[in-house]
Amino acid sequence: MNSVTVRVPAKVNLQLAVGPLRDDGYHDLVNVFHAVSIFDEVTATAETGMSVRVEGESADQVPEDGDNLAIQAALALARHAGRSYGVNLIIRKAIPVAGGMAGGSADAAAALVACNELWGLGLPVEDLMEIAADLGSDVPFALLGGTAVGTGRGERLTPLEVGGRFHWVFALADGGLSTAKVYAECDRMREATGEEIAWPRAADPLLAALRRGDAKALGSELANDLQPAAVMLRRSLARTLETGREQGAVGTLVSGSGPTCAFLAESEAHAGELALSLKAAGVARDVITAYGPVPGPTVV
Ligand code: C5P
């Protein structure tokens, strides 16, 4: 086999509860991850060196050198195996870049799965999970898919039972937001208000709504502690969120560190209508529909 292609989904956070800043620069979190049907594709082809090419949605904003997280994933896997393997990665992007939907983490997870197969390593998912956690806080979930609660810095995962399919609309913004800058702004705003920082907990009503597959109940429980910071750094998001509410979304929130905004609909048809209204309102660069949960990386 000299080529393997893996399809990998984006995520939205249903609850992102940010705890205090830790000594290592990360925050303890409760992060309810939900994989949705927006997919990147990563093709790994056997080669002597390590190289990457990026195509598709905002490809020019993704590094094609050692800063690329998918190449870092391939290198980490080769190191783990104790061999000097080579690979060429081609990443076809549909997940918005720096959009708060873990696109870079998804590509890294896809690279781990593709190279594990390409190089015939046969490593179990537990080994890939360990490598994933070193690459970034969201990479372990990107390997898992579905819906799961992440604790620690987001890397310790417990899969959740979900009683149905949820229909989403995503409003894509021009340009991205740096995750590190959004966390720093969150810390700054909390310091300025002297707000007491609660220890993060998963919200029971949110978990119950997920188990029942109840979109309306889930919509009213969506919560993201990074949202005020993302809106502070990108003021136009306030209007995007407001427009979604006015147009009848059952839940609205900024996805992760933003700037993508997520709107929960009651049904697939409702998501289609909501997408049309948001497009007509001109509050986003692009508007796309998707559903969740979906499985993690799949060899195609
Ligand atoms: O883990 P990752 O490299 O994706 O994190 C990017 C940045 O997001 C970190 O450097 C840190 O500033 C912030 N972060 C955080 N707490 C977390 C996860 C990420 O402060 N739990």
Image (cartoon, grey):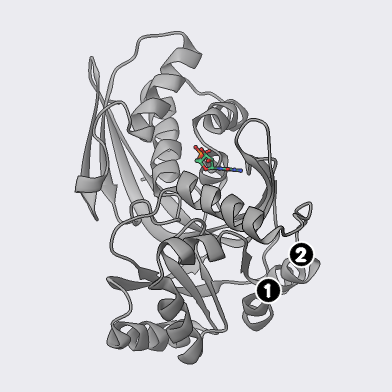
Residue 197, position in %: x, y?
A: 75, 54
140 vs 42, left or right, is right
Can residue 293 be seen at all in this image of the molecule?
no
Q: Is residue 80 above or below residue 261?
A: above
How dense is the environment of label 2, judged by Cα within 10 Å: few (below 14), some, or many (20 and up)?
Answer: some
Query: Element under label 2?
Result: loop
Quadrant of residue 176 in the image?
A: bottom left
Which kind of residue does numbered mark 2 sit on?
Ala
The residue carrying mark 2 is: 203
Q: Residue at x 33, y 30 (%)?
A: 67
Q: Is residue 11 visible?
A: yes
Pointer 1 local density, CA inside 10 Å: few below 14, some 14–19, many at least 20? some
Task: Name the quarter where the C terminus is drawn.
Answer: top left
Q: Quadrant of residue 47?
A: top left
Relative to 223, 103 lies left or right:
left
Q: CA distance from mark 2 to mark 1?
A: 8 Å
Which amino acid is tagged 1?
Glu
Residue assigned mark 1: 221
Asked if 299 appears above or below 187 in the picture, the reply is above
Query: Does residue 153 appear to the left or right of 97 in the view shown?
Result: right
